[in-house]
């Protein structure tokens, strides 16, 4: 009986370690993608800002590229943590998200600046 318990414990420990390693890799991939979209946007207050989405858990700023008014988008939580970014420039879209674990995001923007832009667009009261 004891060898079975030891074997099960070893397997469970290995599965936990693999799960944590996969989680870390997935979070890193998502943050890397969000950083690339953030770099495409440049300053948040730039002339290509074309819209917003106000959601219960976070707010998004949308930017135009060429004829596409919804080309790139960055979404932030109440503290300025970037939780999602979308690149719609190509025929397909690339969505980078940490909605499943927003606190894992290491990418931040100035939330006061986001709120100022949202007020300017009428999404928040003046």
Image (tube, grey):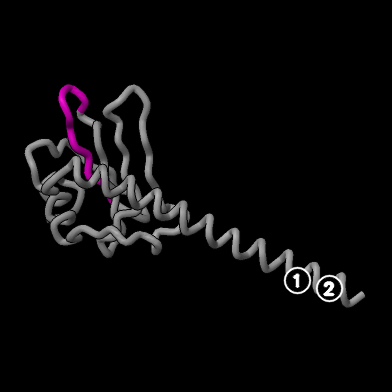
Q: Residue 78 location, x and y as percent?
A: 29, 62
62 within the magenta span: yes
Q: CA distance from mark 1 to mark 2?
A: 6 Å
Identify the image quadrant of residue 87.
Answer: top left
Question: What kind of secondary structure does the magenta stretch mostly adopt?
Answer: strand
Dot 2 alpha-carbon crowd within 10 angstroms: few under 14, some 14 to 19, many 20 or more: few
The front one of 57 and 11 is: 11
Q: Which residue is mark 2?
A: 5
Does 109 sit above or below residue 48?
Answer: below
Q: Quadrant of the C terminus?
A: bottom left
Single out the residue that lies furthest toward the left. Answer: 47
Q: What residue is shown at x 73% (from left), y 69% (from top)?
A: 10
Marks 1 & 2, CB-CB < 8 Å contact: yes
123 relative position to 13: left or right: left
Q: Secondary structure at mark 1?
A: helix
12 within the magenta span: no
Dot 1 alpha-carbon crowd within 10 angstroms: few under 14, some 14 to 19, many 20 or more: few
Range of residues picked out in magenta: 59-68
Q: Quadrant of the N terminus?
A: bottom right
Q: What residue is shown at x 17% (from left), y 60% (from top)?
A: 110
Q: Residue 43 location, x and y as percent?
A: 11, 48
Q: What residue is shown at x 18% (from left), y 54% (from top)?
A: 114
The front one of 89 and 112 is: 89
95 relative position to 110: left or right: right
Q: What residue is shown at x 17% (from left), y 42% (from top)?
A: 41
Q: Which residue is mark 1?
A: 9
């Amino acid at each position: 009986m004891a060898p079975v318990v030891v074997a099960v414990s070893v397997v469970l420990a290995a599965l936990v370690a693999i799960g944590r390693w996969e989680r870390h890799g997935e979070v890193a991939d998502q943050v890397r993608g969000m950083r690339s979209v953030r770099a495409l946007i440049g300053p948040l207050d730039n002339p290509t800002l074309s819209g917003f989405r106000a959601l219960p858990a976070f707010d998004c700023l949308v930017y135009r590229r060429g004829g596409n008014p919804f080309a790139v988008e960055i979404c932030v939580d109440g503290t300025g943590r970037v939780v999602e970014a979308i690149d719609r420039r190509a025929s397909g879209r690339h969505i980078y998200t940490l909605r499943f674990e927003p606190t894992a995001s290491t990418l931040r923007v100035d939330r006061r600046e986001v709120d100022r832009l949202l007020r300017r667009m009428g999404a928040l009261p003046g």
